[in-house]
Image (cartoon, rainbow, N blue to C red):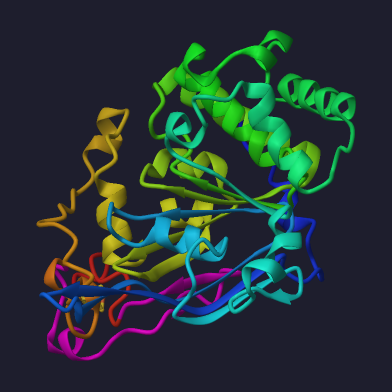
Amino acid sequence: MIEPRSSASASELGGQAPLLQVKDLKMHFAVRGGVFRRRVGTVHAVDGVTFSLNHGETLGLVGESGCGKSTLGRTVIRLNEPTAGSIVFGGTELAHLSGRQLRPLRTQIQMIFQDPFSSLNPRNTVGAILEGPLALHGLAESVAQRKKKVLELLDKVGLPEDAYNKFPHEFSGGQRQRIGVARAISLSPSLVICDEAVSALDVSVQSQVLNLLLELQRDMNLSYLFISHDLAVVRHMSDRVAVMYLGRIVELTDADSIYERAAHPYTQALLSAIPEPTPETREKVRQTLHGDVPSPISPPSGCHFHTRCPWATDRCRKESPVLRQYDQNEREHQVACHFPNASAKGG
Ligand code: SF4
């Protein structure tokens, strides 16, 4: 059972500048071919994304595989050099900093990966894995200090002391993800990017790791960018949710609104695909998504979603919709669609 998240974090933030502000961020990759490896195309993985994240808040990022959500996370943490746009973290512009300039900020932004096994060096003990970043950033100078800090971290993530001398292969999937969480929080960051952090785990183990993330957020006032394809998990974890389609955010609002008042046809179709627990709710009209996400090398003209949208018109094929406020009565509910909520209005 997943504990409900604290709603205090977002509301306590009035007046405080956001921790992270991303503006019109683009991440394009060259496609090369032929003998001379000439550029033959461009992958528009992230194509003009704008959002902010407050201190202690969780922003869920959802969408089908290939929508660009993981690339967005990796670009925010500067594992990719952005093509264009701005990433302001704690008042500092990160988008064009060199590796050396970024180093002091690396302690502040950490990432939890989907596959804990491949992200942990199998030749190192857990103690060595967790002590590495502490030594690198000079946060615990002596061997004894580092060991003490690692034992505290193990306790914090619910692992026994003897984990210190064991190797990653000696743990279950859930325990390995706890090691990944310990590594992510070891430098006391303010922002953690969770990239499909529980997708590889069994459902029962998932909820334990999610509860651990919520507990740590409360204790350490962490902000999460929580990337997942699983809408149910995102709902439990997030204050606000951004839905991505083919490199762009198509809807952004608070977690309850996205589930109760989704207005973009893509969000509505994603929600409609979640199995309903009761016969009454099962009666609702299903909106089926046909086909796959189109290639980001040659995205459809106008609204990227028009090739799969039941409400598409000529305007949708020609004109790209801007992400704008949808309902003036809601604090924040932005939708990128020429005809939001067309299904409720009968098209
Ligand atoms: Fe569908 Fe048109 Fe809205 Fe795109 S802009 S989601 S094609 S109705």
Residue 213 percent location from the top left of the image = 63, 35
Residue 306 on the magenta segment: no
Magenta span dominant secondary structure: loop
Question: Along the horizontal axis of the image, is 143 left or right of 260?
Answer: right
Total label count?
A: 0
Residue 186 percent location from the top left of the image = 73, 38
* Front residue (pair 71, 266): 71
Residue 326 on the magenta segment: yes
Residue 95 percent location from the top left of the image = 59, 76
Above or below, comparing residue 165 to residue 258 in the picture: above
| Extreme residue in the front direction | 35
* Front residue (pair 135, 196): 135
Above or below, comparing residue 300 to residue 137 in the picture: below
| Corner quadrant of residue 6 | top right
Above or below, comparing residue 54 to residue 22 in the picture: above
Is residue 177 visible in the rendered structure shown here? yes
Which residue is rendered at x = 27% and y = 57% of the image?
A: 66
Q: Report ligand 1 position as a quadrant.
A: bottom left
Which residue is rendered at x = 24% and y = 90% of the image?
A: 319
| Corner quadrant of residue 275 | top left
Quarter holding the C terminus is bottom left
In this picture, which residue range is highlighted in magenta? 309-337
* Front residue (pair 114, 291): 114
